[in-house]
Amino acid sequence: MTTYPSIFNDVIGPVMRGPSSSHCAASLRIARICRDLMDENIKDILIEFDPRGSLATTHKSQGSDMGLFGGFLGWEADDERLPESDKHINTAGINVTINIVDIGNGHPNLYKITLHNHKETRKLSAISTGGGMIEVIEIDDVPVSMAGDYFETLIYCHAPDKIISFLKASVPFDDMEFHKGEKSFIEIKAQAFFGEAICKELMEMEGVITIKQLKPVLPVMARKNLKVPFITCHEMLEYNAEKNKPLWELAVDYEMARGNIAATEVFEKMRGIIHIMGHAIESGLKGTAYHDRILGSQSPQFREKMEAGKLIGGETNNRIIMYVSAMMEVKSSMGVIVAAPTAGSCGALPGALFGTAHSLGLSEDELVKAMLSAGLIGVFIAAHATFAAEVGGCMAETGSGGGMAAAAIVEMKGGTLQQSIAAASLALQNSLGIICDPIGNRVEAPCLGRNVMAATNAVSCANMALSDYEQLIPLDEVIETMKAVGDQIHHTLRCTNLGGLSITNAAKKLEAMLEEQPRQFFKSC
C-alpha cells in the first residue's frame, strides 16, 4: 500500500529532545496514545520488548524509557523535564515494569504495553517506523492501524449495528470500522472528536460499554480520500513537465495537497523549523554538557582551529563540519533539536545547508526553500524505503540526510531541477549499506563521523551534479535499492548494539563505565 508522507510529519521533524527519534519521540507518541486509552488514569504499566528486536538492548540507553515515561505523563517531545522522566513517573505514583520476552511479530521496534488502573486493564502494541513515526497495530488484542494522524474515537460495545447507523446519520467522519474481539469496539477516524451531547447519547444506547478518545500526535493530519500530485521522482517530473517549477515549489505543491494547507503556511512552518535548527547550532558552538554521554563538546575547539587557519580544506566544508558537530552535541546534551530526518542524523542536513547558506551569504528565505527541497527528496525515501536504522542501518538515517542535502545544495547554488535530482541519486548511491553500530550503546559515535561524512558527501555530490556528472541510476531506483539493501543487512548491524563497533573491547569498556559512573566518566572526556 502506497503511503503519503508529510514533510513535517515524516521527514523534517519532530522537534524533540533525546538521542534517537526512533526511540525517544516515537515512544513518547505511543505512550501519549496509551495515556488517552486509559483516560489519563494509569497506575501500573507492563512494557515488553522482544529479545530479537533492537529495543531489548537499547531501550534505556537510547531513550525509549525516557520517551515512554514522558508520554505516560502527557508531555511533549521537547519537554525540558524529559531527562528526568523516570523520577517524575515515580513521583506520579505510576509503577512500571519492563520485561524482555518473546512477543513475536518480528518488527525490531515493537512495543507491547499493558496498562492498568483500579477500574480497567487495556493493552496496546505499536511499532516505531523511523524518524519518530509510529503505527499502533493492536488494541486489546484486536488488529488496528493507527498512525496518530486522526482524532480516533473507540466505542466499546456489543451489537454495533444500531450504533453505527446512528453515527453515520449524526457525525462527520473519515473512516469507521468495527473490530471484533474479546473487547470489541467501533473505531472512528475523524477531523475532530464528537461533541459532549453525542457522547452522552451514545453512552445511553444499549450495548455501549465505554468511549475512548485518542488525540492525534502528529502535526499534520490525514483525511479521507487524501491525494497528492506525485509520490515518486518520475511522477514529479511528469507533473512538472509544463510547469518548470524548481524543487522547493514542487515541495510546496506536494505539502499543500498532503496537509490541506496554504502555500504560505507551508513556507512559514518550515521557517519555524529553520529557527529551531539555527538556535541549536548556535547553542552547540557555545559548548554543551550532559552527564550521560561519551563525547565532550568538540565544535568550539574546531571553530578555534578553523579561525586560526590550522585546518585543511575550504571554508565552506569546514564550516559545515563545525555546524554538524554543534548540532550533534546539542542532541547529545538533551537540547532541543529537529529530527531531520532522524535524531541520530540530525546534524548532516542542517549542518550542510546552514554551512552552505552562510558561506554563500544567502537569505533566510533561501534557506527555507532549500530545506523544503530537501524535504521533498525525503518524502520519496519515506514512501518507498525507510528512515529507521533498525530497519535499514545508518544508510537509512545519515545516508538519507546526505541525499536530501545534496539536492538542496544544488538548488542553493542555482542548479537545475535535473541536477538536484542527480545529486541526490549520487549521494544515496555512495551511502548504500552503511551499518548502524553505536559505540557504548549511545547515539554519539560513530554517529557524529557519519553525519559529517553525509554532509561532506552531499557537497561533493552537489558539485559533481553541477558539473553534469552522470548519475546513471535514476533516483527512484536508488531508493528502491536502499530498501532492498536494508533488508539484507544483518540484524546485529541495525542499531541493536550486537555487532560492528558496538561489540569491540573498547566500546564495551565505555558502555560499562557509563553504566557505573556516568558523571565521573564525563569529566575525563
Image (cartoon, helix red, strand yellow):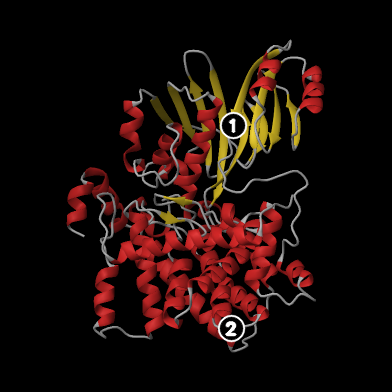
Give the residue type at disc 1.
Answer: Leu
Q: Is residue 234 left or right of residue 313?
A: right
Q: Which residue is mark 2?
A: 414
SS at mark 2? loop
Of label 1 and label 2, which has the lower sequence position? 1
Where is residue 120? Give x, y as percent: 53, 16
Q: Quadrant of the C terminus?
A: bottom left
Q: Is residue 188 shown to the viewer in this render?
A: yes
For marks 1 and 2, give the CA distance. 46 Å
Q: 268 or 30, which is in the foreground?
A: 268
Q: Which residue is mark 1?
A: 214
Q: Quadrant of residue 189?
A: top right
Give the residue type at disc 2.
Answer: Gly
- Give the answer, above or below, for where 411 lies relative to 49: below
Q: Is residue 452 left or right of residue 113?
A: left
- Give the answer, above or below, for where 172 lies relative to 353: above
Q: 259 or 143, which is in the foreground?
A: 259
Residue name at image x 34 percent, y 65 percent: 282
Q: Could you classify mark 1 by the number of other residues whose Cα lies within 10 Å: few (under 14), some (14-19), or many (20 or more)?
A: many
Residue name at image x 56 percent, y 73 percent: 408
- Give the answer, above or below, for where 195 lies relative to 268: above
Q: 4 or 196, which is in the foreground?
A: 196
Where is residue 429? Give x, y as percent: 59, 73
Where is residue 48? Give x, y as percent: 48, 32
Q: Quadrant of residue 125?
A: top right
